[in-house]
Each structure stands twice: as structure tokens, then as C-alpha cells.
Image (spheres, helix red, strand yellow):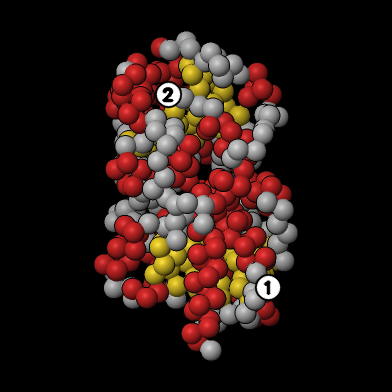
Amino acid sequence: MKVMSIFGTRPEAIKMAPLVQALEADPDIESVLCVTAQHRSMLDQVLELFNLTPDYDLNIMKPNQSISMITSNVLLGLEPILAKEKPDMVLVHGDTSTSFVAALAAFYQQIKVGHVEAGLRTFDKYSPFPEEMNRLLTGRIAELHFAPTERNRQNLLNERVRDNTIFVTGNTVIDALLHVAGKPYEFEDETLKALDFDHKRVITVTCHRRENLGEHMANIFSAIADIAREFSDVEVVYPIHLNPKVREEADRYLGGIPNIHMIEPLSYQPMVNLMARSFFILTDSGGLQEEAPALGKPVLVVRRETERPEAVEAGTARLAGVDRATVYKLAKELLTDQAAYEAMAKAVNPYGDGQACSRIVEAIKAYFEQQS
Ligand code: UD1
């Protein structure tokens, strides 16, 4: 049976890499890897870390690309590849435009789709934008749904997805995390090398979502600047996404503050090590909300909603919103109230046990055995 994995951005690559490795290792499966390269350098960092060589590379990334450009280039680019390879199943991940469009391209050739990280919902089609709609539409097309948690399964059942097509597997991000965490590692980045992790409290920041661009980012960055100015024992590290719009805003609000360090995007291994050595994490990312609880680090989520409420319920994440005063207040609380900090800094793992990939491979094999 031939299974083609298709992805294009950094987070998809991190979460699909251990699955592609598991597919490649299985003697019953012929694994084909196609990347769209919706991201270029940020994707290549992950491919290199996990030793993956794509069979096909659409190389679609353009500076300041619009969602329509991504959509049309992926759709047209995949058509001949799918026609030539004729895979039995295409695997896509999560909620990016690459994921949705790859599912659509497969559907047009009546190729079955497996959706990894299925069933996450905010129930607001504009937030995150366009991700909530991407995952809804991918879910409509998919034949098999690999849901990280029981709640994700329930979301799919509520949309009348058939129970016997849903598999609760855990999130493959934990498989990826276990692959790199625990390996001895020394930073290569000069800024990180020079940081005094023993005597300073490091706050790791990531922020780049489309719906946060503009006013929200101005609020979030202003709150971070307030904290950095007030606490001299704090060092803020912001590995900044390559999106030029994000870079402009970050420079405007965070530039010139000595204990704020804006650095180039980190590869996965240094990123995991930075999180593990941080005091807490402030982010609008999805993946970090899953990784930080596993590392026992408090997370302030700078968004108005989350499709990952499990970490909030477990007590390690808080939804901080996008308002300057609230973000400042919650960050200050973690820095000044030891009991509040300790209540959040506990290792919990609502997102899986590191075996998600083997469960997905087994489910795919069982599906094809039933068909034959
Ligand atoms: C995309 C996904 C989002 C995902 C995020 C993770 C869509 C619509 N958005 O958002 O779901 O959470 O990736 O990062 O699918 N760039 C580079 N080099 C790179 C990567 C990006 O220069 O290696 C620049 C490009 O100029 C590009 C811009 O970043 O135009 C934005 O990238 P894009 O893929 O359009 O959106 P993201 O915000 O990264």
C-alpha cells in the first residue's frame, strides 16, 4: 500500500516527521513524501533534523504570499504528482492551507485522505484565521481521522463523523518531542550561548498568527516591553518568524530594549532546549501549547480562544487574551507570586504518550486490510 504524506510549513513538518519515519520503517507500506514548501528555510531545518528527503518538492513559497497564492499553487502543483503516484492514501496534518488544499487535490482524484491532528475546534471560523476553516474542510474530506484527544473525537462526533473512522492516538508532537528532548545539547546561537540561565529568568516568546497582526500584536508586544523594563532579572527571548510583517511590528515595539533578544527562528532541537530552560512561555502558537505542559513549563496563551483547552484544564496554560493590561498582569503574577507559579509549573501530558505515530500506522493498515 502506498501512502503519500504532504506538508509544507514548519509545524506540520515537526509533527509529521516521526510519522513519516514510522511509515518508512514499515515493510508493508511504500512511503512517499511530498512537500509544498509553503515555508522554505523553516521547513528545511526540520527535514534536516529528522533526516527526511522529500520525493517531491513544489517549492511554492513567495515573499509576502497571499492565501490565494498558496491555495492555487498547491492545487495545481499537486495534480500531476498525484496522477503519477496514485497513492492509496494521502496524509495531511492539522490546519494550514497546504493541509486543506492537499486534501482537496486528493479528493479531486478520488484518493482517500487521512487527517492527522483531527478534530481541534475553536468554533469561530475567523479565529484562528484561516486555520479553523482549513481544519473543518479537511475533516469533511477525510476518510480517517486521527484525533489527539478524546475531546477532539467528541468534536468530530458532534459533526456526525462516523465513530469507526475516528482514532484517538495522542498528538504526534509528543513523539517528536521525545525524539529530541533528553539528548545532550549546547546552544549554537550566540545570544543563547551568552545567556545566564542560572541567574536570570528567561521568558520565551513566539507570536506570529495572522489574526494577531496589527492591534493585538501591538498590545502583546507592549505588555512584554513593560515586563522587560520592570524586571531586571528577566531576559526575554523571541525567536522571530520570517514573516516580514511580523518582523516590522516586533522591531517597532521591542527593538532597543536591552533584555529583549530577538533572534532568528530556531530549529526544533534548540527550541525545545530553550523552552526546557525557560521560566515560562508566552505564545500564540498551537504546538508550544502542547509541548510546554510536557516540559512542566507554564504557558500564557496570547489569543482570545484556544482549540487546545486540555492544557488550560490541566492548569499549566492560561488564556491571557490580547489586551495589554491583562497580559502584563498575568506575566507579572508568574514573576512575583511563587504559589501561582508553582501551581502552573507541573509536568502534565494531556496530549499523548509518544506512541501516536505507531497507532496511526496500525489504523491505516487495519483500514486497508478491511477493504481488501
Ligand atoms: C503558516 C500557516 C499557519 C501555521 C504557520 C506556522 C496558512 C495560511 N498559515 O502561517 O497555519 O500556523 O504557517 O508558522 O497555512 N517565510 C519565509 N521563510 C520561511 C517561512 C516563511 O520567508 O521559511 C515568510 C514568507 O515571506 C511568507 C511569510 O513568511 O510570505 C508568511 O508565511 P505563510 O506560510 O504565508 O504564513 P504563516 O504566517 O507562516
Classify 10 Å Cα crowding around label 1: few (below 14), some (14-19), many (20 and above): few
Q: Residue furthest bottom?
A: 372
Name the residue carrying label 2: 224
Classify 10 Å Cα crowding around label 2: few (below 14), some (14-19), many (20 and above): many
User: Residue 155 versus residue 133: which sits nearer the camera?
Assistant: 155
Q: What x and y, as percent, mark residue 41?
A: 67, 46
**Location of residue 165 (image quadrant):** bottom left
User: With respect to residue 188, does 212 lie above or below?
Assistant: below
User: With respect to residue 263, does 44 lie above or below?
Assistant: below
Q: What x and y, as percent, mark residue 57?
A: 69, 62
Name the residue carrying label 1: 27
Q: How many numbered marks does the figure carry?
A: 2
Residue name at image x 39 percent, y 48 percent: 350
Residue name at image x 62 percent, y 66 percent: 23
User: With respect to residue 127, does 99 lie above or below?
Assistant: below
Q: What x and y, as percent, mark residue 59?
A: 68, 58
The three-letter amino acid code for the residue at tag 2 is: Ile
* Real-space CA distance between mark 1 and mark 2, rounded to the nearest whole angstrom: 50 Å
Q: Is residue 87 left or right of residue 339?
A: right
Q: Which mark is residue 223?
A: none
